[in-house]
Structure formats: C-alpha cells, structure tokens
Amino acid sequence: MLSSSWRLVSLRRESLRKVSLASIRPTPRFRYYYSVPRPPNMAEDAAIKPAPATAPPAADAPAPQKSEKELAKEKAKADKAAKFAAKQAKLKQQQPQQKAADAPAKPKKPETPALPAYQDETPAGEKKKLQPFDHPHFSAYNPSAVESAWYSWWEKSGFFQPQEPRTPDAGNFVIALPPPNVTGALHCGHALANSIQDTLIRWNRMKGVSTLWVPGCDHAGIATQSVVEKMLWKKEKKTRLELGREEFTKRVWEWKGEYHERINNAQRKMGGSMDWSREAFTMDQNLSAAVMEAFATLHDEGLIYRSSRLVNWSTHLRTALSSLEVINKEISGRTMIDVPGYDKKIEFGVLTHFKYPIEGSDELITVATTRPETMLGDSGIAVSPGDERYAHLVGKHAIHPFTQRRMPIVEDTYVDKEFGTGAVKLTPAHDFNDYKLGKAHNLEFINILNEDGTLNENAGPFAGQKRFDARYTVVAELTKLGLFVKKEPNPMIIPLCERSGDVIEPYMTPQWWVSMKEMADAAMKVVEDGTIKITPESARKSYFQWLKNITDWCISRQLWWGHRIPAYRVVFEGEENKETDQSPWVVGRTPEEAAAKAAEKYAGKKYTLEQDPDCLDTWFSSGLWPMAILGWPNTESPDFTRFFPTQLLESGWDILFFWIARMIMMSLKLTGKVPFTEVYCHSLIRDAEGRKMSKSLGNVIDPLDVISGISLEELHAKLYSGNLKESEIERAKKNQKEIPECGADALRFTLLSYTTGGGDINFDLKVMAAYRRFCNKVWQASKYVLGNLGESFKPVANIATAALSVPERWILHRMNTAVKGINEALAARQFSTATKLAYSLFYDDFCDVFVENSKGMLSPGSNPEQAESVRQVLYLVLDVSLRVLHPMLPFITEELWQRLPRRQGDETPSILLAHYPELEEAFDFPAEATDYELGLRCAGGIRSLAADYNIRADGKAYIKASTAESLEKVTTQLEAIKTLSGKGIAETTILGPDTDEAATPKGCAVYVVSAEVAILLQVSEQISDMNAEIKKITTKLQKTTAAIAKQEELMGREGFEKVSDVVVTAEKKKLADAQAAKENYERTLAEFSKLQL
C-alpha cells in the first residue's frame, strides 16, 4: 500500500469526445496525487482575527498590560484588515453581477409543467400493470414510476426464498445481513452494504445457485436505550429511573416497533431481495434462547467469569463500555471541552503539580497529574529505581493532606524520571497503568466515585461533589494548604464515550468477563489456513494485529434494554446482602435451571437467588448472529443443516473487531465450524469533501431522500425530529442541500461504482445525478429497440453468425467480452470494475455505436434481410444487457425486460430468475472486432478534430492509410465511419499509400489513429491567423510534453506498483492519451508549417 498521502480526488470518466458538463458520463476514473497544503484564502484570512503568536498565559496568570502606542498600532492593523476584507467581499459580489450584465440575454425556455405524483394502479403484491411508453410518466425515465409495484410482487411470489439449485453442483450462496440498529433510519453505509450484498445475491440466483439472504435488526442495547432516554426527557422531562425498569422497557419495545418497520421498508425501497419469511431480531425468543445457551456453555467451561477490575465507565450512561466503544481524542495542550452534565466547559490538557508531605519530617515530594481530582484516591507514590532525588524516600510514607492516609513510596521501572517531577502518584482504582502497579506493590485500591460520577465517602470532605467540579475545588484546597505548585499545558489523550460524548472514567466494579486468548488463537488459525478469506488485505492485517493483542472482554452492561444476564447470586439467610469478590453465583439457561443447580449445590442451606440486573453487551448476542438466525442451538434444524456455515459476511471494516472477529471466535467455540467462508470489508462513506458524516454537521445522507428526492425545507424539518441541540441544528442547516429524485437503481449503481476495495469513499450527489442520466439512457435505448422490432418480431433461439455483418459481429464480440469481464469482476468482488464494464457496454458500445449505426440499416429502403438481422442483434444485445445489469439495477431492468418479446418456450416469470449471461464462444470475433474498431477510431478522430475547430457543417475529412492492408480495412468500414462521424462532415475521402505528396490536401489538422492510419481534417478556412494557431498548438505541445514527463515520474515512484489494478490502469491510460495527443500536435504542426512555406 502507498502512504496515506495518496488521495482519491476524481471520479469522473474521461473520453475522447469533448462533452459539456451536463453530458459527462460518470464511468469512474481515479486520479491520485501526493497531497499538498491548500493555499490560504486571502479575503477570508484578512477578516479573521489573527491568532496569538505565543501560547496563551495560564489561567491564573495576570494579562500583560499594553502601551497606548501598541494598542493604537493594533487598532490600525485591524482597521486595515477589515477594509481589505470589505473590499474583497464587494469585488466578489460585483463579479457575478458584472458577468450577468455583460452576458447576452438568453431567451427563456418555457417551463415544463410538473407531473403529478405517479399513482400505480397495480394491487399490492400483484404483477405490475405495464403502461405504454407514451404515458406521461413513462415517456422518459421516471424512477418513482419505474420502481413502483415490482418489489411487493417479487416478495409475494416467493422469489426471494431459496430456490432449488439449477444443477446438482450449483450449491448455496448464503448471506446473513449485518443487522442494522433498531434505533433509527438507515444511512449510506447501510445502502452501500445492501447494494453490494444484493448484487451478489441476485447474481448468484440468476446463475442457478440456491441463494438465501436473511434480514434482521439488532436491539442495540446502549444505542437504543440512550436514544429512548433522550426522547423521554425531551418529550416528558422524565428519566428511566422515574419510570422504572418494566415501564421503561415497555417504552423501548414501542420505539422498536415503530423504527423496526421503518428500517424494513427502507430495505425494500432499495430493492434488497431478502427472505422476509426468515427475518430475525436479536431479542426474538429463539435468538434469546441462543444467547442463554452461549452464556451458560461458556460459563460452564470456565471461559466466562466474574471479576472486580477496572473498566471503561460512562458516568452519563452509568454503564461499563468496551474499549472498542471508546473514542480517544488527542489534544495538544490546554483545551476546554463540553462534558454532559456540566453547564460550563471543563479544562483538560493541563499538568497540575502539587506536593505531598513526608511522614515524620518537614520534607515534601512533588507529583504531577492531568486529573487532580483523582488524588483523593491515591494510595502510593512511585519513583524510578536509582533516582538520586528520591532514593532516601523509598520505603517511607507520604501523608494524604485530606484523609491522612499513609501512602508508601515505592520504586518501579515503569516511572520515567525525566517526565514531570520523576515521582508518580498512584491511583490503582482509577487508572489502568496504576492498576498494574497497585497489584505489583500490593497497594490499597480506593474507589472514590459513585456510578453517576459524584464522589463517594472515600473522598472525605469532597464527598457529594461531581468529579470535574472537584477538579477545581481540590486545587483550591491544595493552594490554601500551600501544597499547590503550578499548572502547565500538556498533550494528552481523552477517552470519550462513542454514544454520549461523556469522558470515560476508569472505574473499579465487578463485571462478567470472557477469556479470549484460546478463542483468538483458533480464529487466527482459520484465516491463516485459508478456511476464511478476508479482503481487502488491509482488513486481514488489522484482524491479526487485534487478535494477537487481544484482552479479556467485559460483556456485562448496566442497562435495562437487552438480554438480562442469566446469572443468579446466592444470598444466604443471615448474611449481608452485599456482593463481594467471594459471593457465590449460579448460571442457568432458565430460572428453573438456575434454581435446580443451586438446590443441588447448596442442599440443606437457606438462601435466595437474585438475578444480576445487568444486561449483556450487544456484541455478545450479535456474535451469535449467523448461526442463531439459522436455528442454533438446534443443530438439527433444517436451515442449520442446509445453510450453515454461510458463504459471505459483508460489512464495514470499522466493525471488524466489534463483530466479525467475535462471530468467528464464538462460532468455532460453540459449533466447531466457521460462521462463513469469506469476509469482504467495504470502505466507509464520507461526504463529497471527505468529512465524516454526522447529524450535527448536516451532511448525513438518508438513502430514502436520494431515492425519492427531498426539498431543503423538508431536510431542515427532519433536524428537529431528532435529539440535536438548537445550536447543532443551526450549524447543520448550513451544510444541507436539496436532493433531486434519483431512484434506488441510480443510488445502488453509484455506490457500487465507488467500491474499489481501497480507501474511504467521498460520496458526491453530482455523481449520483450522472448515473440517474445513465438510467435514462438505458430507458431511451430500450424504447428505441422495442419501437423498431415491430409487432410481428419473433426472437430466434440462436442467431446464425455466418451471415452477420462486421458491425453486428463487433457488438456481439463486445457484449461477449463485457459479459466475461463482469462475471470475473463480481467473482473477484471488484464492484467498480463490474459497473464500469456494464456501463461501457451499454452506453459506449451499444448506444453510441451500434444503435447509431443501426439507424441507417433500418432506414426505409434498406435490405429486408439485413434489417431483420439487425433487429435480432438489437434484441439479443438488449436482452443480455438488461440481464447483465439486473443485479445492479433491479427495478429498471425488470420494467424493461417484461416488455421484451420472449423466445418460444421461455416462461421465466421475472428477470431475477432468468439465466445470467455467460461467455459464448459463438460470439467471439476478435479479428472482425479489431477491424471495426479501427473504423471507430477513425470516426472518433474526425469528431474530435471537428469539435476542436468548431466545424459544424460542410467539413472535409480524409483518412490516410499508409499500407495496402490498412487501406482495405478502412475502405470496408467507410460507410460506418461516415455514419458515426457526425452531421458536420459532408465528405470523407480515403487516401491510399500510393497518394503522392502533391495530392495530399493542405491546411489539415491531424489525428493519429495508428502507425498506419491518420485522419486529416480541412481546417485552413477556419483559421484566420496561421501563425497564431501554430503558436497555440506549440503551447499545447509543450504542456502535453510536460504532462507526459510528470506522469512518467509519478508512475516511476517507489510504491506505485503496489496500488490497485484500477489505479494502475487509469494512470497508464492517462499516459497513453497524453502521448497520443503529443503525436497529434506534432503532426498538425508539420502540416501547418507547410502552409507557411
């Protein structure tokens, strides 16, 4: 892989033709460059108050007084900057006005009245009633009209359920849909995953494989509880504690019911061909039973245990978190940060120095900390072995100034004597590093916090204060005692709760843990030996890196929404009802099983059983997903025996550790099998500017808004329906833009075109709009073909290839080549390549060439046999193209394929059950294709020169062939060349190898087609100043030569050979195009120079 400075900056296809922005066709082209800093905006910089050149003074330092002269000088600078900014703003405002005034007035086009919303007459679940092409909603591509009715028919007809394989060896292809959180709407990441998965499901189904795609939702413990709590407070000003567990859980189930259905409807709108009869939810009865079975089994084997140790604690949510649910925010120095539950920002990034008195002497020892409030839990001080400053203190005790606690001074190699004071305060119960030192030196573990972040009785006089309020009051009291030394800025990492933004607190509490080492080793082995394939390679490397450094997993969460832990504490009669490290527990899959175990173990004793109030980490239940949705723990269930293990797990790389690795570990442990044989990790989606999508930024794109379109006012209104603060809503509004209706097909195709297996995706709605135009091209070309087949047309079973013309053989060869390439690309999970090949086949080859060429062949007076042959080829290519495109564009292809006449005996009810095209040797015509493409390049060269010199009528073109062989080829292609050269060319003449110099026309621009063929276009009449034209072409030649050198230098850089094939191919093409342009300029200059002579 190259360094991160390689950036994706372009996704626009370049072609030989020069086209307007409105007609750009978006076949992806990738351009990489070494990043450079963006130049500053002078006008913006002038209006911004300059930042101080030095670090700001400490909070308690007095501000330096400035002289009157300095103040006057600053004022003058500020006035000057303000005037400059105002001038720049005025110029910026005047420029478009001036341009508008200078521009000639254009006649306004009459506005086309907007069509009313399409109302489909098809009863729900019935096959769609097709409307004629002259219907107002079907004369052009209309996504809402085209995509209506089909899905409910597919679903009701059972097409999404597993079909019997077409051949005995076809096998299965099963995907367990990564269950979206039930908390709300789908986002573009879900849309990308669904597009990839549905493309593979539909492709395999059409290939005759028995396919199953199981949908479902995740209960998302922390996320859902957090959202519902916020909504509860926003609407009723109540907390869950005020409602009580039972009522609160009831509210969450109501929330789930509303949003679950909304998510499923969104999946349907996107065309996902999921088997809804097998839909699952992580808290369904059968999946809950699987969770209980897994917990009990792992506990019985000793892999699940209870232990009191440090966890990541969210005081806002009052629950433990996995380290994977914590965001580490780096700051460079003093920073004020908003923390939930505080009215004012809290200070971070400051190292506070203070002193501890030494017992029995007047000596003091200075320590430093970024969390002064934690000194209330200090139980020791560590120094570096051999540090002469403190050697005499080792073995003595410091005295805590607020609690009079004796704190031993110990030596440990962990301490860096060069950092801070060289003496480290130890708070074993509130710091992960100190925890280890506390264990090593047998220090006291003193918890000073309550679950809500307030200080408990161990904090002495500070008990009851909030932790970050105590940050200030502790320093104030130390100052009063003369023990405060100083504060200084200090870089640090702040752990934040991913869900709430709360600052995470290391907190000592008893939790349930899973021992991971044994399972991690097994999970690495199945990837090493190839049983599971993980792509891309970057994801595979990350997988191993994480598993090699894995730690035990804390699986208990202090929540009310989720799977309640099936563990019961045994409380003996007469003993204090308070948990200790020695408290006995029993675990049962059901309360009855737990009671039976306790009765057997504690026979004759009186006790009660109290179930742990905590819930399991959501990722524990999700880790069972592929096997639980197919019936586990009932390994004899039909679905489990037929479909497990599944074939593919497709997901974002960001949950590789949260979920994917854990599924592999748990499946191997509990079933002895892998849960799937392939993992494909897609990229993350960012906005067009590369920013992470965030509700507060207003750049989140709802797939349904892309499909149906949404106004700016409606987007603004959606912001108020969530939990954003008013300030966040106002900021979000500024980044929102109206979204035109694009349809599900265009959305899917766009997302697939972005999927290269490389870095993050910068999602641009302009690219989306371009692919919507591609859908319109598919629509219009299909209309043309169907309109020219005739009512009596009957497609033949097999085309007689011997009688086909060269253009017909060419399009069949191009179709065959594309079919082969698309099948290979989908098999290799190269989705961008597959869309590029499909797009190029339909747009470039079929529409731009063969359809255009066919117009002459089908014109009145044409040979009837030739016309019939052309119709058969048009039909075949359209049929194959629609079937090739179907996995990517399911709706439009079904709508159009249903309109095609059928071959005799073909009763296939839907395109999704039709055969996917495969390579056919009968359509392999490499020699004819090469010959025809020479003619196409000739036509392309003529069009290119005509566009360069603005020749729109009466153009004279010449094809100069330098060998007898090339002369024969272009001669046979002359009529096709004339047809495809455009209306601006009146004459096209062939010049053979025997044409002498005198007969060669003068004043021609040159386009080199090959070493043997060149195009000459008469342009002298268009050039008023030949010297100026030569100068202009010379400048172009110089720039092109420089571009070639730059491109060769880029491709020769170290590491370039390691980039993806897509990038290498694109960069090689750029170089080849530049080299061809250079030759064209050189030949044209040579021709123009003759006129000067």
Image (cartoon, helix red, strand yellow):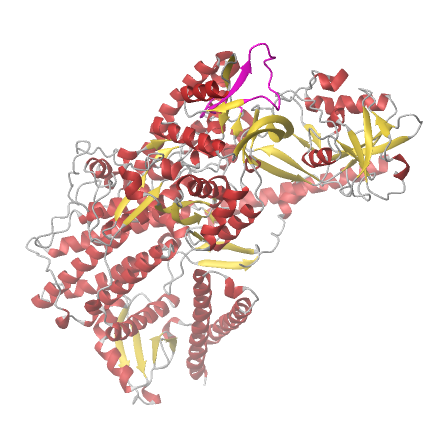
Residue 282 percent coordinates (x, y): 39, 30
Residue 400 percent coordinates (x, y): 82, 24
> Does 612 sit left or right of 89 as displayed?
left
Would residue 970 be counted in the magenta stretch? no
Looking at this rendering, what residue extends furthest in the right direction?
362
> Does 934 sit left or right of 67 as displayed?
left
- Residue 98 at least partly seen: no
Residue drawn at point x = 63 percent, y = 30 percent = 309
- Residue 36 at least partly seen: yes
Q: Main secondary structure of the magenta part?
A: loop
Residue drawn at point x = 26 percent, y = 78 percent = 970
From what the image shows, is residue 789 above or below residue 641? below
Specify the quadrant that holds the C terminus: bottom left
Q: Nearer the viewer, residue 337 or 709?
A: 337
Q: Nearer the viewer, residue 918 or 574?
A: 574
Residue drawn at point x = 63 percent, y = 35 percent = 495
Q: Residue 594 lies in what quarter of the image?
A: top left
Q: Nearer the viewer, residue 58 or 264?
A: 264
Q: Which residues are magenta?
A: 558-584
> Does 793 sit left or right of 274 as displayed?
left
> Does 413 sit left or right of 514 as displayed?
right
Q: Nearer the viewer, residue 321 or 743?
A: 321
From what the image shows, is residue 464 above or below residue 812? above
Residue 881 percent coordinates (x, y): 24, 56
Would residue 583 be counted in the magenta stretch? yes
- Numbered-mark total: 0
Looking at this rendering, what residue extends furthest in the left direction?
792
